Image (cartoon, rainbow, N blue to C red):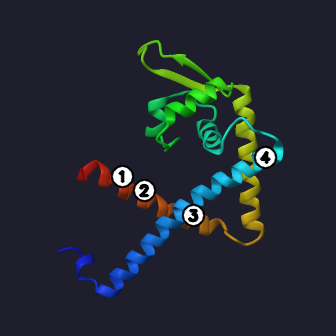
Amino acid sequence: MSMHSKLPGAHQQGFMGGYLEALALVERLHRLLLDVIKDEFERVGVIDINAVQALLLFNIGENEVTAGELKSRGYYQGSNVSYNLKKLVETGYMHHQRCEIDRRSVRVRLTQKGRDIRAIVATLFARHAEGLQEKGVLGADGIEAITHSLRRVERYWTDQIRYIY
């Protein structure tokens, strides 16, 4: 019998409520992050790229990757990777090249234009990190605790996908 099945009903319901609230918060934070990036782009006059594509460029950075690696390395969690890669190539933010070994696979890397977008996002994130600390919203211990907890949830969910189904 698991330890959780021995918990009193009210405690279990309290945990479930907290878990559902945390899930909703993670989802809201992601959407809010996209809005913050969109607002920054409007402020600096970038109009031909969306926030999801900008995050993709930011996460790829100086790496050269295949579309498959984007998901496996955790650079991109969206369901429309191919669409966004195609758009980023069409708009000149990324180079693409067929792999020599596996001709079906395409490797992508940022162009200078893509690196410029990455720099805008990096500057925005640096400004946020500084502001969070200066205003006392979150310190080093707090960010470490949040990151540690989210990594544990990520591992748990990953294990559920790998071993349950």
Residue 94 at x, y = what percent?
64, 26
Name the one closer to the observer, 7 or 18: 18
Residue corresponding to mark 2: 154
Q: Earlier in the sequence, mark 2 or mark 4?
A: 4
At label 1, the amino acid type is Thr
Decide which of tag 1 and tag 3 comes sooner along the chain.
Answer: 3
Give the label, 3 or 2, closer to the camera: 2
Q: CA distance from mark 3 to mark 2?
A: 15 Å
Residue indicated by mark 4: 42
Question: Marks 3 and 4: CB-CB under 8 Å?
Answer: no
Q: Amino acid at mark 3?
A: Glu
Which type of secondary structure does the marked residue at label 4 adopt? Answer: helix
| Image quadrant containing the N terminus | bottom left
The image quadrant that residue 128 belongs to is: bottom right
Vertical order, 62 against 12 (above or below): above
Please state which amino acid type lies under the numbered disc 2. Glu
Are the two marked residues, 3 and 2, in contact with CB atoms closer than 8 angstroms?
no
The residue sitting at 58% across, 31% down in the picture is 63
User: Compared with residue 163, is residue 48 higher up or lower down, i.e. above or below?
Assistant: above
Q: CA distance from mark 2 to mark 1?
A: 6 Å
Q: Which of disc 1 and disc 4 is earlier in sequence?
A: 4
Residue farthest to the left, as pictured:
1
SS at circle 1? helix
Q: Percent from the top left, x then y, of residue 12?
A: 33, 81
Q: Is residue 98 above or below residue 122?
A: above
**Residue 109 image position (x, y, % from top left):** 60, 26
Task: For marks 1 and 3, give the CA distance.
Answer: 21 Å
Q: Amino acid at mark 4?
A: Glu
Residue for badge 3? 144
Q: Are marks 2 and 1 in contact (CB under 8 Å)?
A: yes
User: Can you tell which mark lies on residue 158?
Assistant: 1
Q: Nearer the viewer, mark 1 or mark 3?
A: 1
